[in-house]
Image (cartoon, grey):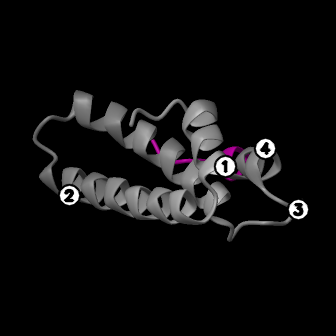
Amino acid sequence: MSVTKKQKIESVQQFGRTASDTGSPEVQIAILTRRIASMTGHLQANKKDYASRRGLLGMVSRRRRLLDYVKRHNPELYLDLLRRLDIRK
């Protein structure tokens, strides 16, 4: 259900500025996107899991704030992230 360590490493390699970059907004957005996709699948199977739904809404809000930050500081990177992560806007 959750994102594995291997998947996080793949996200860091794909979106990070360096090999050990875990704090940049691009990497955080990529990891949150994987977590959101995983949680969405869980909630489709467990419709009454309201605690997880609340956690999902928090993750979506955090990703939205990070995307807004990237959009303010680097609009080209913002559009690239939306395209590469297949996020609707």
Q: Position of residue 41 (x, y in %)?
A: 35, 31
CA neighbours of label 4 inside 10 A, class few (<14), some (14 to 19), many (20+): some
Query: Is residue 10 rendered to the left or right of residue 76?
Result: right
Q: Which mark is residue 18?
A: 3
Tag 4 residue: 14
The answer to whether residue 17 is left or right of residue 79 is right
What is the distance, in whole Å, between disc 3 and disc 4 at their CAs?
10 Å
Farthest bottom residue in view: 23
User: Relative to 67, does residue 21 appear above or below in the rendering?
Assistant: below
Tell whether 75 sits left or right of 7.
left
Q: Earlier in the sequence, mark 3 or mark 2?
A: 3
The residue that label 2 is drawn on is: 54
Quote the CA–CA distance across marks 3 and 2: 33 Å
SS under mark 2: helix
**Amino acid bearing label 2:** Arg
Return the disc, 2 or 1, that comes first in the chain's sequence: 2
Q: CA distance from mark 2 to mark 1?
A: 29 Å
Crowdedness near tag 3: few (<14), some (14–19) or many (≥20) residues, C-alpha within 10 Å: few
Location of mark 1 (residue):
77
Residue type highlighted by circle 1: Leu
Extreme residue in the right direction: 19
**Measuring 78% from the left and 56% from the top, which residue is drawn there?**
16
Q: Quadrant of the C terminus?
A: top left
**Marks 1 and 4: in contact by CB < 8 Å?**
no
The residue located at (37%, 58%) in the rendering is 59
Query: x%, y% of residue 43?
Result: 25, 37
